[in-house]
Image: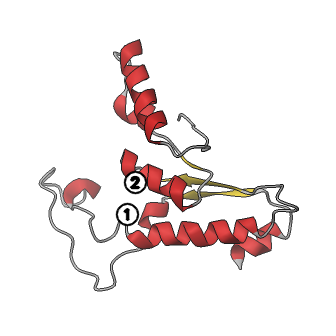
Amino acid sequence: NVLRFWLNRGVDGFRIDVINHVFEIESLKDEPLSGHTNDPNNYGYLDHIYTKDQPECYELVRQFREVLDEYKVNGEGTRIMVLEAYVDLQLSMMYYEAGATFPFNFWFIEHLNGGSSAKDYKQVIDNWMSQMPAGSVANWV
C-alpha cells in the first residue's frame, strides 16, 4: 500500500536502501562470531548469516516489481526500483533477476583504489558486465 500511495501521486520510482537487511530468520538465533575483530561493538564482530541476505529479500523485490508494473500504461512508463545493498556479485545479480532496475554497483569503491591500473578497472567492469542479465542497466558508484 505504501508503494501504491506514492505511485498514485506520480512517483516514477523508488530507491530502497539496505534491502538485504529487511529480513532475519524467524528463530532469532544468535549469530556466530566472525573472527574478524575482538571488538563486540564493531559490526564485523558477528557473522551476520541470520540477519542479512535472507531469501525473503528477493521475494520482496519481486512483489515490489509486480506493484510497480501495475502502473505501466500500454506497456510504457516502467517504474524504477534502485536497490542499495553491499553484497557480492552473485547476490547483486539476483536482485536484477528479482526485478530491480538495478542494484547499486559498489565494485569500483570496494575493489579499486588510487593505485588501481586501467587493467584493474577493465577487470572489474568485465566481471560485472559478464554476469549482468541481458537487457539490464549497468551502473558504477
Give the structural element (helix, strand or loop) at label 2.
helix
Earlier sequence position, callout 1 versus callout 2: 1
Give the residue type at disc 1: Asp
Q: Mark 1 points at which residue?
A: 53
Q: Is residue 80 visible?
A: yes
Query: Which disc is residue 135 wearing?
Result: none
Give the alpha-carbon distance from disc 1 to disc 2, as whole Å. 8 Å
- The quadrant of the rendering that contains the N terminus is bottom right
Residue at point 57%, 38% (across, down): 138
Where in the figure is residue 137, as x and y percent of width and height?
A: 61, 41
Q: How crowded is mark 1: few (under 14 residues within 10 Å), some or many (20 or more)?
A: many
Give the residue type at disc 2: Leu
Residue at point 29%, 71% (across, down): 50
The correct choice, above or below, for 22 with respect to 11 in the image is: below
In which quarter of the view is residue 15 placed? bottom right
Give the structural element (helix, strand or loop) at label 1.
loop
In which quarter of the view is residue 10 placed? bottom right
How many numbered callouts? 2
Q: Name the residue under label 2.
A: 91
User: Are dots 1 and 2 in contact, CB under 8 Å?
Assistant: yes
Q: Can residue 22 be seen in this view?
A: no
Closer to the eye: label 1 or 2: 2
Where in the figure is residue 70, as x and y percent of width and height?
A: 77, 70
The correct choice, above or below, for 70 with respect to 20 in the image is: below
